[in-house]
Image (spheres, helix red, strand yellow):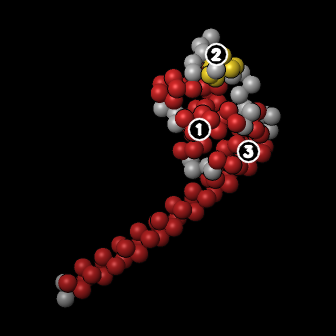
Amino acid sequence: MIRITIEEASKKYNIPIHILKEYESWGLCQEVKKVMGSWQYDETDLERLSLIMTLHDLDFTVEEVEKYMKLSLKKNENECLKLLNKKRKGILDEVHLKEKQLSRIDYLRYEMDRGNKK
């Protein structure tokens, strides 16, 4: 079983220290032991941290990440799925907005090109 410090986890897995401290403050790391004044992370913690980083990359807020992780640890898959679906809908709404904006830009370019050919 591996055990690494917060600094080692941050460096090795490219996880910002503030995210590691958030993780510790949520009480999600029952596997983490305080050894000689520093936390020691094991494989379970690193798997959870990987999920936390994925959620951060998906623009989950800190509060959403904490809620998701607590639900996940309670094996509440239905509520986790609701959070994922909500985030997915928000991302799709953004994509559709950007598609509309691109369409408008293309129309303006078309009109400009058409006007130059007259």
Tell me how many marks there are.
3
Residue 96 in view, yes or no: yes
Residue placed at 64% from the left, 16% from the top? 36
Q: Which residue position is annotated with label 2?
A: 36
**Relative side of 21 to 57, left or right:** right
Amino acid residing under circle 3: Lys
Residue 77 in view, yes or no: no
Residue placed at 70% from the left, 42% from the top? 66
Q: Is the N terminus in the top left, top right, bottom left or bottom right quadrant?
A: top right
The secondary structure type at the circle numbered 2 is loop
Residue 90, picture quadrant: bottom right
First reached walking from the N terminus: tag 3 or tag 2: 2
Q: Are marks 1 and 2 in contact (CB under 8 Å)?
A: no
Up-down relation of residue 69 to residue 36 (above or below): below
Q: Nearer the viewer, residue 32 or 97?
A: 32
Up-down relation of residue 112 to residue 51 (above or below): below
Q: Residue furthest front?
A: 37
Q: Residue furthest top?
A: 1
Q: Which residue position is annotated with label 1?
A: 19
* Location of residue 27 in the rendering, given as x and y in whole percent from the top left corner: 74, 33
* Location of residue 115 in the rendering, given as x and y in whole percent from the top left corner: 24, 86
**Relative side of 24 to 73, left or right:** left
Q: Is the C terminus in the top left, top right, bottom left or bottom right quadrant?
A: bottom left
